[in-house]
């Protein structure tokens, strides 16, 4: 059975067991490997993508649930509806040297980008709420928090100018 | 002048690499290099004068290759798992080469003797040793390359080498107003003779070491970095394995009829320790694995429970063990004591729980094998895989990839998941790439845990409130036993059990003993190894003693550290920056701890707030670190921050427990780890130092638990003798 959805701006039609998690459809069938497998039970956030603009744990989302919808992964962030937020987050991540092993960071960045879209000036509580589902075993959390705030400031500066 | 110690290896490697560059390997490497940034320099008005030589890159030695485009490629012999060797080792090369940082690219070195860890005589990453063992070696590699570039310029310009300068990737001769890039002189440099000696810079002349540089493990914010999980090769199969439910259980029989009918399934194989399913994709393999009907023989399986084990350990702790330290007259100290304080501490098994569960890619064609994975023990894995396949170790090629965390897990003398992958490839018997993928549950179940331990401590305080005697017994499994590291066990004492338990304090009588317990639960080092528990129990017990003596925990420590100036210095610095002794709002308290591991001294002050409900929060951790020369200060800060967060997980949340031999935890819903809402602010201060650099990957981790325990002790007057503490006190 074919499932049709839009992935990073491109229409996709894949013949696949509809119960296959979206994560594995993206990784194994569409060969986009930036989205990571961490736990498979929506406990770690490494698999976070955007489904119709909202953060989604793709490891527990059957690909059938993406039918007719828009999926954005880390690879498509630059050309997505949240490209400004995504770019600000990625720049802030690099400037603050957030990353250590890096395995969780695609998911962290997708969650942080979605947060900035809905909360352009996130408080510490907003950050906790949006990011507590994303585990980082290297514990880069302090820099993640700082980078989100820097990205928010950068975006405000751009809007104002 | 400094004798070039590694000249022989460098020459050997040079010949080898030259050969590689003429083959497909070299080509693919060259294609991976990004475009080089034009070097900018104050001498840009000088005329460019360089030979017009098209040719091969300049392979200066095993570690440094300079391309025609001036890209400096540094072979990194330590696995990059977030701790920063791509940045750190490249910094050492670039410093002596006088390269521009932007022209430097870091790549993973192959598994070959030239890349051995100089501390251990094998290729391996661990013990916070990357910078420590490479500090001279990598600088020499850079200095040799610089010497040959200067020699090329000297020859081509016909000017004395001593009059040639190299600054940020530009070679110049001021008197004749000439300059060239590295790339322009690369071919001619390759023809220069190797130096007998190189002179390394004096630390006062460092321009890169000690500064903040961008990290070289790139591609981690746009999804382009390639981890093992991301390897895609033509016709690759994914393997998922059914493992025994308990340690010691063996495969009795299995029925794969249902599994084989599922789409994508290619093969089902019996292994030494399970049943492997090979399919076209991960999801197909997992569905088929779950459809297997497997019977296990559990006659000899592990059946114990954590509560019973702790009770047994506590009993053992009451009896004398194998002696590690015996100093002074302990009996007399207890006899003359004005107070005797006793405490029993307990810590559970811990999983490494790397974000990337263990995985490994192999292709075996019957005579040669090629691996792709986040390899941490190249020499060991290579030899053991070769043995399984019946080929020579040289026929096993390992492509070391970025690792999605390790914390010790991938440095395993048993090469466990690597050999499982190898067995699958051998049993499948076809020359196709196979990726073994463990699910999170597989990864947790497979174990190799930080062992559980019981510590019994007893100390004598004299009339003045000083420690007169100290007795410490440690009960737990030996990590070294049954491995190639077993010879490290002396008089029954495994250094991996006791390291860090020889307290730095001036105590006249001390005894430290161990009881080694045999269990079938697989155990392994876990970020900072024995210090994970020895630092916790000794530093928490010190606070119990300070309280019994009615003394301030900082003053108490400082008074016993007159012979340990580096301990004193980090303690004083952390205390000062944390405002130790200054008033705090109601419900807040501070705790302090200090510990040396891997040659690095770390003191931490934790500040906690405790609500009336008992909920507590770690508000802030102030950290002082003395790691000798700070090669990459921002990497050091990042390792201190992350290491403290990593240490707070077992202090507050994490434990692996067993019920009748079955593991209770399986994934992140029940094996709890620190999340962003639980992360404190961390303030890191690096002690300026001219001492040789020591490791930073591990030493902040073991100090977090005692700093927190001591802060909660200060807040509640109840000592915290069991980890994890939980989220309430």
Image (cartoon, coloured by chain):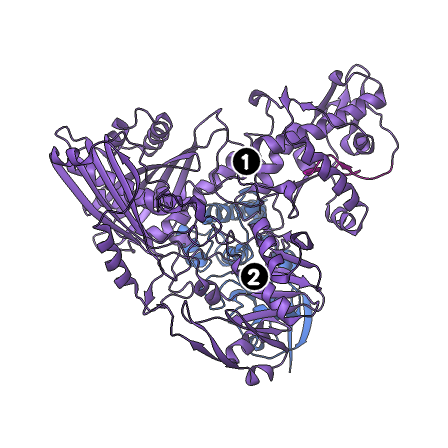
Chain colours: A blue, B purple
Instruction: Report whether residue A67 is seen.
Output: no
Instruction: Report whether residue B242 is seen.
Output: yes
Identify residue for label 2.
B419
As for residue B63 lying within the magenta part, the answer is: yes
Query: In the image shown, does A128 or B461 lie closer to the viewer?
Result: B461
Q: Work out whether mark 2 precedes mark 1 in sequence or the reverse, and give the earlier one.
A: 1
The structure residue drawn at horizontal position 74% and vertical position 48%, both measured from the top left corner, is B29
Query: In the image shown, does B710 or B147 lie closer to the viewer?
Result: B147
The magenta segment: B54-72
Query: In the image shown, does B314 or A52 lie closer to the viewer?
Result: B314
As for residue B143 lying within the magenta part, the answer is: no
The disc at residue B133 is: 1
Question: Quick check: B729 above or below A49?
Answer: above
Q: Main secondary structure of the magenta part?
A: loop
Which chain letter matches label 1?
B
Q: Nearer the viewer, mark 2 or mark 1?
A: 2
Q: Residues within 10 Å of mark 1 (few under 14, many from 20)?
A: some
Distance of label 2 from label 1 (alpha carbons): 28 Å
Image spot of residue B385 (x, y percent): 60, 58
Image spot of residue A20 (x, y percent): 57, 75
Which quarter shows the N terminus of chain B? Answer: top right
Query: In the image shown, does B56 or B383 lie closer to the viewer?
Result: B383
Residue at the outermost right position: B52
Q: Secondary structure at mark 2?
A: helix
Which chain letter matches label 2?
B
The structure residue drawn at horizontal position 53% and vertical position 38%, both measured from the top left corner, is B119
């Amino acid at each position: 059975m074919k499932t049709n959805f839009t992935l990073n701006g491109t229409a996709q039609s894949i013949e696949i067991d509809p119960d296959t998690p979206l994560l594995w459809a993206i990784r194994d069938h569409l060969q986009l490997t930036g989205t990571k497998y961490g736990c498979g039970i929506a406990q770690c956030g490494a698999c976070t993508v955007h489904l119709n603009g909202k953060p989604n744990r793709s490891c527990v989302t059957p690909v059938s649930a993406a039918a007719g919808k828009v999926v954005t992964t880390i690879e498509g962030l630059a050309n997505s509806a949240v490209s400004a937020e995504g770019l600000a987050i990625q720049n802030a991540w690099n400037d603050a040297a957030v990353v250590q092993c890096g395995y969780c960071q695609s998911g962290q960045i997708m969650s942080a980008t979605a947060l900035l879209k809905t909360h352009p000036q996130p408080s510490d509580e907003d950050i906790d709420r949006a990011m507590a589902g994303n585990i980082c075993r290297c514990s880069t959390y302090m820099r993640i928090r700082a980078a989100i705030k820097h990205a928010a400031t950068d975006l405000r500066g751009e809007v104002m100018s | 002048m400094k004798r070039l110690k590694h000249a022989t290896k460098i020459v050997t490697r040079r010949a080898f690499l030259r050969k590689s560059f003429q083959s497909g390997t070299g080509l693919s490497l060259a294609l991976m290099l990004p475009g080089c940034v034009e070097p900018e320099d104050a001498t840009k008005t000088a005329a460019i004068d360089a030979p017009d030589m098209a040719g091969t890159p300049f392979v200066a030695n095993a570690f440094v290759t300079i391309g025609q485009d001036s890209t400096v490629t540094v072979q990194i012999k330590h696995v990059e798992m977030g701790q920063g060797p791509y940045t750190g080792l490249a910094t050492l090369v670039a410093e002596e080469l006088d390269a521009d940082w932007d022209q430097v690219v870091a790549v993973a070195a192959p598994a070959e003797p030239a890349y051995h860890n100089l501390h251990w005589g094998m290729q391996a990453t661990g013990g916070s040793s990357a910078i420590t063992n490479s500090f001279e070696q990598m600088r020499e590699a850079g200095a040799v390359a610089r010497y040959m570039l200067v020699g090329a310029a000297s020859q081509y310009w016909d000017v004395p080498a001593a009059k040639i300068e190299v600054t940020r990737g530009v070679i110049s001769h001021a008197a004749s107003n000439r300059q060239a890039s590295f790339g322009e002189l690369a071919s001619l440099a390759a023809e220069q003779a190797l130096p007998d000696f190189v002179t390394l810079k004096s630390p006062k002349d460092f321009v890169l070491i000690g500064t903040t540089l961008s990290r070289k493990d790139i591609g981690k914010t746009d999804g382009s970095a390639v981890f093992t999980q991301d390897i895609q090769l033509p016709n690759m199969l994914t393997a998922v394995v059914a493992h025994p439910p308990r340690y010691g259980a063996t495969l009795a029989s299995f029925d794969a009829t249902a599994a084989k009918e599922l789409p994508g399934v290619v093969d089902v194989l019996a292994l030494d320790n399970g049943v492997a399913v090979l399919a076209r994709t991960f999801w197909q393999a997992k569905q088929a694995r779950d459809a297997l009907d497997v019977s296990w023989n559990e006659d000899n399986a592990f059946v114990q429970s954590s509560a019973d084990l702790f009770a047994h350990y506590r009993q053992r702790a009451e009896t004398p063990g194998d002696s590690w330290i015996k100093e002074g007259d302990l009996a007399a100290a207890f006899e003359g004591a004005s107070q005797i304080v006793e405490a029993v501490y307990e810590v559970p098994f811990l999983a490494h729980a790397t974000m990337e569960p263990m995985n490994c890619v192999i292709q075996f064609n019957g005579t040669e094998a090629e691996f792709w994975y986040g390899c941490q023990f190249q020499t060991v894995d290579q030899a053991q895989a070769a043995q399984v396949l019946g080929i020579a170790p040289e026929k096993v090629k390992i492509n070391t990839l970025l690792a999605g965390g390790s914390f010790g897990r991938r440095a395993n003398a048993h090469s466990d998941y690597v050999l499982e992958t190898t067995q699958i490839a051998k049993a499948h018997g076809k020359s196709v790439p196979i990726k073994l993928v463990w699910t999170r549950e597989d990864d947790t179940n497979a174990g190799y845990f930080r062992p559980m331990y019981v510590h019994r401590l007893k100390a004598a305080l004299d009339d003045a409130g000083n420690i007169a005697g100290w007795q410490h017994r440690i009960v737990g499994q030996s990590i070294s036993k049954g491995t190639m590291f077993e010879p490290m066990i002396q008089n029954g004492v495994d250094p991996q059990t006791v390291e860090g338990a020889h307290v730095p304090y001036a105590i006249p009588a001390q005894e430290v003993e161990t009881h080694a317990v045999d269990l079938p639960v697989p155990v392994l080092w876990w970020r900072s190894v024995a210090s994970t528990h020895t630092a916790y129990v000794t530093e928490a017990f010190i606070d119990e003693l300070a309280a019994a003596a009615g003394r301030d925990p900082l003053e108490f420590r400082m008074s016993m550290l007159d012979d340990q100036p580096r301990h004193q210095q980090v303690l004083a610095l952390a205390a000062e920056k944390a405002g130790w002794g200054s008033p705090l709002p109601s419900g807040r308290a501070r705790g302090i701890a200090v510990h040396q591991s891997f040659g690095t001294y770390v003191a931490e002050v934790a500040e906690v707030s405790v609500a009336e409900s008992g909920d507590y929060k770690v508000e802030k951790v102030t950290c002082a670190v003395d790691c000798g020369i700070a090669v990459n200060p921002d990497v050091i800060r990042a390792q201190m921050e992350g290491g403290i967060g990593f240490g707070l997980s077992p202090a507050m949340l994490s434990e692996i427990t067993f019920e009748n031999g079955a593991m209770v935890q399986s994934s992140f819903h029940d094996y709890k780890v620190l999340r962003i809402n639980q992360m404190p602010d961390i303030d890191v201060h690096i002690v300026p130092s001219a001492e040789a650099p020591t490791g930073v990957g591990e030493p902040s981790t073991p100090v977090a638990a005692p700093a927190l325990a001591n802060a909660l002790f200060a807040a509640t007057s109840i000592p915290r003798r069991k980890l994890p503490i939980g989220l309430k006190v």
